Image: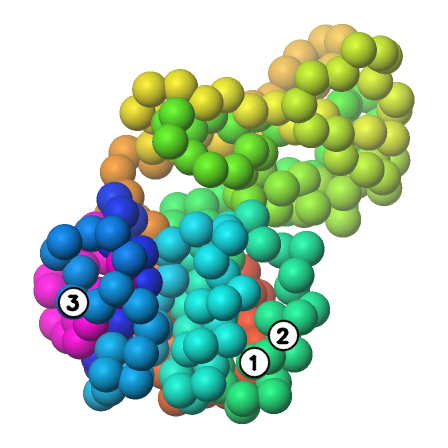
Amino acid sequence: MKISIIGYGKMGRTIHEVAKEMGIDVSSIIDPTDPNATHSSITKEAMENVDVVIDFSSPKAVLSNVEKVASFKRNIVMGTTGWYENLNYVKEVVQKNDIGFIYSPNFSIGVNIFFNIVERAAELVNNYQWYDAYVYEAHHNQKLDSPSGTAKQLGQIILSKIQRKKKMLFGSIDRKIEPDELHITSVRAGYITGIHIVGFDSEFDNIELKHEAKNRKGFAIGALIAARWIKDKRGFYSFSEIFRDLL
């Protein structure tokens, strides 16, 4: 399999390193500013001999990147977050160009195991009204979006499984939280790779589930596994919906 990497920041460089370990060829690296990139933009030459494009660029670039890559009929693994309000438009572009597309707020294998654990825990907590739920996340001070896409996904899981929770709140609030609200909070500081905590609190005890990323390698492995899965497929997928098939 041959891939192209869009965005050669920390995540893009990690994908490059792990691809070598997994025997996957990197045909091109696309980044408008990095001197180590092979191309500064998405061109016909950059897409030559490419099976799948892996994008870890920036939220502002996602729509343009998808349009350009789709025009060359290349499949896409989208690891960039912060664009999900345009999900339906991207799906239309994918379907119009008959390509394969897979996205996730987090391609880490461990995080996707964590999603499944949280889903089961929330199903259990749904039966016991004494417990309130919360989500807390922390990342390095260079992360562009807040809260993280992973935190939002965790929130969606909780809302889907705990019937008394109806909506998410982000950031600080200056009022009493309502019983049907789920508070998601964020911290940005230093070099934190990624911490996500889901808690269930009652007047008599507290349950916390935690995932902490040690480095970016787990994210890269998941993205490359997704690339292998989507290589010869068509359609629009989320990593979470096909994760159990991969296992």
Tell me which amino acid carries mark 2.
Lys
> Where, quadrant-wise, is the N terminus in this rendering?
bottom left
Sequence order check: which comes first, mark 3 or mark 1?
A: 3
Residue 187, image x and y in percent? Answer: 50, 21
At label 1, counting other C-alpha atoms closer than 10 Å, the crowd grade (few under 14, some 14-19, many 20 or more) is many
Sequence order check: which comes first, mark 2 or mark 3?
A: 3
Distance from the alpha carbon under mark 1 to that under mark 2: 5 Å
Q: Which residue is mark 2?
A: 91
Q: Which of label 3 and label 1 is nearer to you?
A: 3
Question: Element at badge 1?
Answer: helix
Verify CB contact (< 8 Å) between mark 1 and mark 2: yes
Which residue range is magenta in the image?
Answer: 13-31
Residue 215, image x and y in percent? Answer: 26, 38
Tell me which amino acid carries mark 1.
Val
Report if residue 99 lies within the magenta region.
no
Q: Which residue is mark 1?
A: 94
Residue 95, image x and y in percent? Answer: 61, 85
At label 2, counting other C-alpha atoms closer than 10 Å, the crowd grade (few under 14, some 14-19, many 20 or more) is some
